[in-house]
Image (spheres, coloured by chain):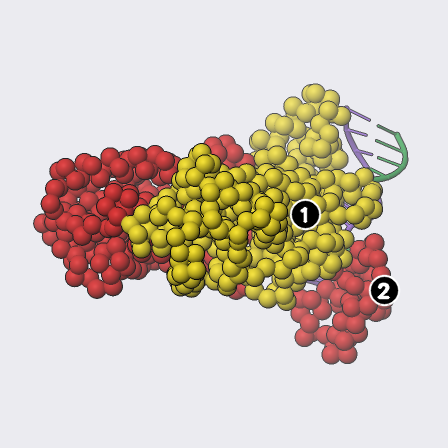
Chain colours: A yellow, B red, C green, D purple
Amino acid sequence: MEPKKKITFDDIARYTNFSKTTISRYFNNPDSLAPESQRIISDALEKLHYKENKVARILANGQTEFIGIILPEFYHRFFSEVLNQILSTYETYGYKFLVFVGNRNEESERRYIRELMAYQIEGMIVLSHTISSEELAALHLPIVTMEREDRHVCSVNTDNYTGGRQAAQLLDECGCDVLLHINSPTSPLIPAYGRITGFLDYCQGHGLRHELMLRDVDRSHESDLAILRELIDDMEERYRGQKKGIFLSNDTLASTMINLLFLKYGRLPDDYRIVGFDNSPASREAIIPVSTVGQQVELLAQEAVALVVEQINARKDGKPLHSRKPVHKVIDPVLIRRASTGGTCANG
Amino acid sequence: MEPKKKITFDDIARYTNFSKTTISRYFNNPDSLAPESQRIISDALEKLHYKENKVARILANGQTEFIGIILPEFYHRFFSEVLNQILSTYETYGYKFLVFVGNRNEESERRYIRELMAYQIEGMIVLSHTISSEELAALHLPIVTMEREDRHVCSVNTDNYTGGRQAAQLLDECGCDVLLHINSPTSPLIPAYGRITGFLDYCQGHGLRHELMLRDVDRSHESDLAILRELIDDMEERYRGQKKGIFLSNDTLASTMINLLFLKYGRLPDDYRIVGFDNSPASREAIIPVSTVGQQVELLAQEAVALVVEQINARKDGKPLHSRKPVHKVIDPVLIRRASTGGTCANG
DNA sequence: TTGTAGGCGTTATCAA
DNA sequence: TTGATAACGCCTACAA
């Protein structure tokens, strides 16, 4: 009962008086075997405690069933949640995931990619952003990116632009006198930039007083505290007595903002309305539940994997990978109204 | 320049007039080649755009450099942070990680394990808890568990018992009249149970008035809110006018408790002292920074991987895996004093 | 310092 | 319905 030596098809073949080929068929095309043979082989596998070896199978048929994942970091819940949802698709597609977290430089990310290629991954999902989509496309591999520059590869992203508009609209409906958007300086090539343009477009289109406040947020909680404190002082001076609608680039930041106001006033003052982005746990668990533009992370992840798998299958059918332009799927955001904008009703 | 066909050692050998063996040596033992030969081969690799194939190498030498990981879930930051830190050890050891999240039943977890074994993983790190350590040990594979029952396999865990004592001691030093510990019903086989015994032992050893409040917390934020509200009412009735030191089983719960008190009183009342567990971002980002028994997650992860790698290496040296009893490494918790217990000083 | 030959455990191709 | 044989791409004695 000690499984010292590995049992191979050869052993099964010898034991059953079939050939290796037949054993292989038992796994890959069982119905081509006589029912009786299937039983015999099945029994032998049991008796000899056979354990399959996918490495050998890969070498023979080229299908690793591996998809590589490269994440930039784990600090933001968004990334760990995306990973969680991607991993969950194992139940649907059976693909296994080789995961790298590339919180370093360009060169180390190239090493990750080289390593992934060496393991013959069939596709890749990229959320890190140091490698250009052009370079990624040159790998000639099914690739899907999320939340990053994606001109030359397929991608799945939240409709950030609509999200930005929704946030502005919600604050507008709350009867705010001035709409503020706090974000970090963002490249127009990155999907999240749409939050800014969506916000601005809505405000301009509706003739709303507004202001874009770009600061270096999201570096650390401590620096965020300092930055937000300063912004609060600034706002209270310049918009004294006016109802301020603040749209922050993520829920953690929004929650921090609410905490600061709470510390100052013992409650969320009535001349403040707050909206975050993501619908992360932070928005639900904040001292005041935060209204937020929710990303459908589960759907994002599912579509990303689906899009990679699609490309993998197309390729198996001999279709060239780049016959058509890259596909950019867009997922609707879901506006979630909570207490930070006056509860589930929208009338402030 | 289209890399249609894969370049193999054969191609390089033909191109350079060396044998396949020599090409192989270039990768595995380059110094056994003449410097001139190295140059020639190196150039050829460049010119032909060779890309290594680790699957073939694995089949030949048996070393996948894969470590399997099974996590129970991703909701608690602890798990995503552990994963993050485990993945980061790639830079140190070069092992790649195949990750499964087993938020389902026993049978699906067995499927994960079977899949991992099929890919010839060299070791495994297990944080999920549906499969007994006995069954894990029977895999005859280097295994390390964390935060779960570990009688028959190696493990790395925080010294939860000491953590429980530290929490109690801190509350004691704050001059609390009564010490409360809120936790969910926990099996004594799980390391986290030590938090309870540590807390109780300290209280009993020092003759402190105390109470253990076991409730079904951690199911969802909403139910946690309801449970904690009830507990607050209960405490305020039974310990009216007394200084209450509350030790909660994790930072998220502690933060929620503080939020509720804040909502009730507009501040953290002076007759409350709060301590959490983990030192997760939630403790820093709470409206009042939460004192906490910090887990050294980076260290935990490093030690876990180190312990797996140790076993892998020992095995390569022909040593039997179970020559000795399983090793249980214990990592010290780090008490972090913050505002929820009156700031960095311990005297309340 | 380099080469020859066999093997790793499957799958694929042709036959029977 | 089943088999024989040659891949798959690399590694490892053993030789030279």
- The answer to whether residue B72 is visible is no
Chain assignment, label 2: B
Determine which quarter of the picture holds residue C4. bottom right
Residue visible at 61% across and 52% down?
A197
Query: At numbered mark 2, what does the secondary structure look like: helix, strand or loop?
Result: helix
Q: Residue A64, which numbered label?
A: none
Amino acid type, residue under disc 2 in the picture = Arg
- Calculate the distance from the C-alpha at mark 2 to the C-alpha at mark 1: 41 Å
Residue visible at 14% across and 52% down?
B176
Pinpoint residue B53: horizontal percent, then vertical percent: 71, 56
- The answer to whether residue A194 is visible is yes
Residue furthest out toward the bottom: B35
Between A93 and B243, the residue placed more toward the observer is B243
Residue visible at 22% across and 58% down?
B342
The image shows residue B50, relative to residue A67, as above or below, that is below
Tell me the residue that label 2 is attached to. B14
Within-10-Å neighbours for mark 1: few <14, some 14–19, many 20+: many
Q: Nearer the viewer, mark 2 or mark 1?
A: 1
Pinpoint residue B167: horizontal percent, then vertical percent: 23, 53
Q: In this view, does B164 lie to the left or right of A254?
A: left
Q: In which quarter of the image is the C terminus of chain A?
A: top left
Residue furthest out toward the left: B207
Tell me the residue that label 1 is attached to. A155
Chain assignment, label 1: A
Pinpoint residue B246: horizontal percent, then vertical percent: 22, 47
Residue visible at 81% across and 39% down?
A317
Between B180 and B147, the residue placed more toward the observer is B180
Pinpoint residue A190: horizontal percent, then vertical percent: 63, 55
Query: At numbered mark 1, what does the secondary structure look like: helix, strand or loop?
Result: strand
Q: Is residue A314 left or right of residue A125?
A: right
Amino acid type, residue under disc 1 in the picture = Ser
